Amino acid sequence: MSGRHTTQEAHRLLTEYDAQLREAAELTGATTVTRDGPLWRGTYGDRGFVTCRDLGHLTGPALDELITRTITYYATQPAIASFEWKTRGHDLPADLPDRLAQHGLHAEEPETVMLGEASLLAAPVPLPQGVSLRRIDSQPDPMPDLIRAAAAQERAFGVPFSPAHLARRLQAKRDLMEIWVAEAEGEIICTGRLELIPGTAFAGIWGGGTVPEWRGQGIYRALVAQRARSALARGARYLHSDSTEFSRPILQRSGLLPITTTTPYIWTRR
């Protein structure tokens, strides 16, 4: 694809992203959803999530008031330990991240939003000898494997992962989420989720991570391909992912395009 056509396709995909994957689509599985002007606010157990598609030209004091109301909304719910305000690099006003920081929210690492045709990622990828792929969420009792998958994610990303949180997320999205793993010698060495988004042509690929000693052997790419085939079989046309610096090159080589960035801003109860 030429540079001009790539730019045109990225613009088309960004339009689809804004139309199909913002606001209500992001809050599938939330226990509560409320609105405050252009904002959508959800809760998931002890966590909150804030998103919007268009801040309606709010700037200056009006935007500060909206941020303050949002903090108060979550702060007055004792069960809420933190919330995420999801920002995108192409959104206006451009000073929203600065204002969130001024109100005490801290930025996590930015990620690249990757989008493209699921068919581009679906071709089978050879696995190293002794490695196999398996879906673990559809068995009668997935909890033992969820515990093992969470431990593998913890090793892959270097941060704690709660199997109980994964189980709650699976319960909330029972018919919309698949959890796939790669195994070798009885050990889970790579994990990843596929999440179908109702009412859209999209599925998301999330949580992909390979334990350090198995990296560089195509296992993550094979797990992406498996999830792409599953997404196509279930009627999705597009895949999207908020990608780290490690996963972005793999997805881009497969044909997905970077269309914007996303940075979570986090409020934590003190």
Image: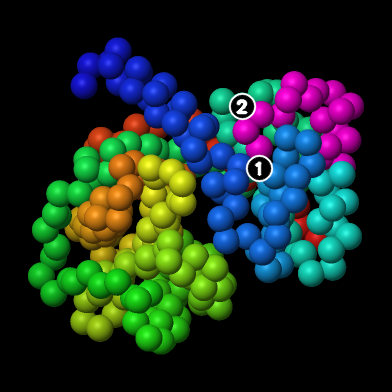
Q: Is residue 47 left or right of residue 29?
A: right
Counting other residues with Cα less than 10 Å from the Cα at mark 2, is it few (<14), some (14-19), or many (20 or more)?
some
**Mark closest to the chain's N terminus, 1 or 2:** 1
Q: Is residue 16 above or below residue 138?
A: above
Residue 56 drawn in magenta? yes
Give me the residue at 17% from left, 71% from top.
131
Q: Nearer the viewer, residue 70 or 36?
A: 36
Local crowd size for mark 1, using a 10 Å CA cut-off: few (<14), some (14–19), many (≥20): many
As shown in the figure, which amino acid type bears the numbered disc 2?
Asp
Residue 161 in percent (x, y) is at: 52, 70
Residue ID for mark 2? 91
Amino acid carrying label 1: it is: Thr
- Numbered tag placed on residue 51 in the rendering: 1
Tell me the quarter of the picture where residue 23 sits. top right
Residue 138 location, quadrant: bottom left
Identity of the residue drawn at 39% across and 45% down: 202
**Residue 40 appears left or right of 203:** right
Name the residue: 85% across, 58% down. 75
Q: Is residue 85 left or right of residue 111?
A: right
